[in-house]
Amino acid sequence: MAKELKFVMLLDCYGDLLTEHQKSVMELYYCEDLSLAEIGNPLGITRQAVRDIIKRTENILLNYEEKLGFAERLEKMRECFGKINETARLVENENIRKIIADEIKNGLDLL
């Protein structure tokens, strides 16, 4: 998994455990793809300060994932739902196929 995608997933899983400032900087960097200067200027902090926040927060997120493992489990569940969906396409009965597809959607919405 690409490093950027990994941190987007970790931010999605554990973002609410961060301070608002940490979460905001990480979202601007990883989700909005802003540069360090573009993040720092409106906040009145240097590029280096932004980089420090990002590095510290990356370590916090990695630590959460190491201890809790939610992001890895979510990814495995998504893969599982994908395989079930592929297999459900082989079901000839349209009503059963629709029920399976609806339940897969419900399961993915819960993730």
Image (cartoon, helix red, strand yellow):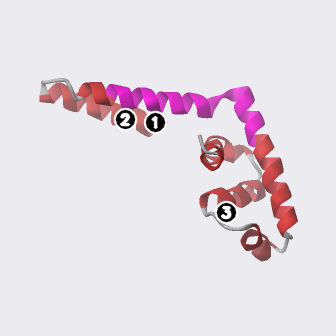
Looking at numbered disc 1 in the image, what kind of residue is underneath it? Answer: Leu
Distance of label 3 from label 2 (alpha carbons):
30 Å
Q: Is residue 91 magenta?
A: no
Amino acid type for the residue under numbered disc 2: Asn
Number of labels in the image equals 3
Judge from the rendering whether residue 64 lies leftward or rightward of residue 27; answer left or right: right
Q: Earlier in the sequence, mark 1 or mark 3?
A: 3
**Image location (x, y in percent) of residue 81:** 39, 29
- Magenta part of the chain: 61-84
Reading the image, the residue beneath label 3 is 28
**Horizontal arrangement in the rendering, residue 39 relative to residue 90 (left or right):** right
| Residue indicated by mark 2 | 106
Label 1, secondary structure: give it: helix
Q: Secondary structure at mark 3?
A: helix
Q: Which residue is mark 1?
A: 110
The answer to whether marks 3 and 2 mark residues whose Cβ atoms lie closer than 8 Å is no
Magenta stretch, overall SS = helix
Instruction: Say whether disc 3 or disc 2 marks the residue closer to the N-terminus.
Output: 3
Q: In front of the other: label 3 or label 2?
A: 3
**Could you tell me if the residues under marks 2 and 1 are in contact, i.e. CB atoms within 8 Å?**
yes
Work out which quarter of the rendered image holds the N terminus and state it. top right
The residue located at (46%, 33%) in the rendering is 78
> For this view, does 108 lie left or right of residue 65?
left
Name the kind of residue labelled 3 in the image: Leu
Distance from Cα at disc 1 to Cα at disc 3: 26 Å
> For the residue carrying disc 1, how many other residues have a C-alpha within 10 Å: few (<14), some (14-19), or many (20+)?
few
Label 3 Cα crowd, 10 Å radius (few <14 / some 14-19 / many 20+): some
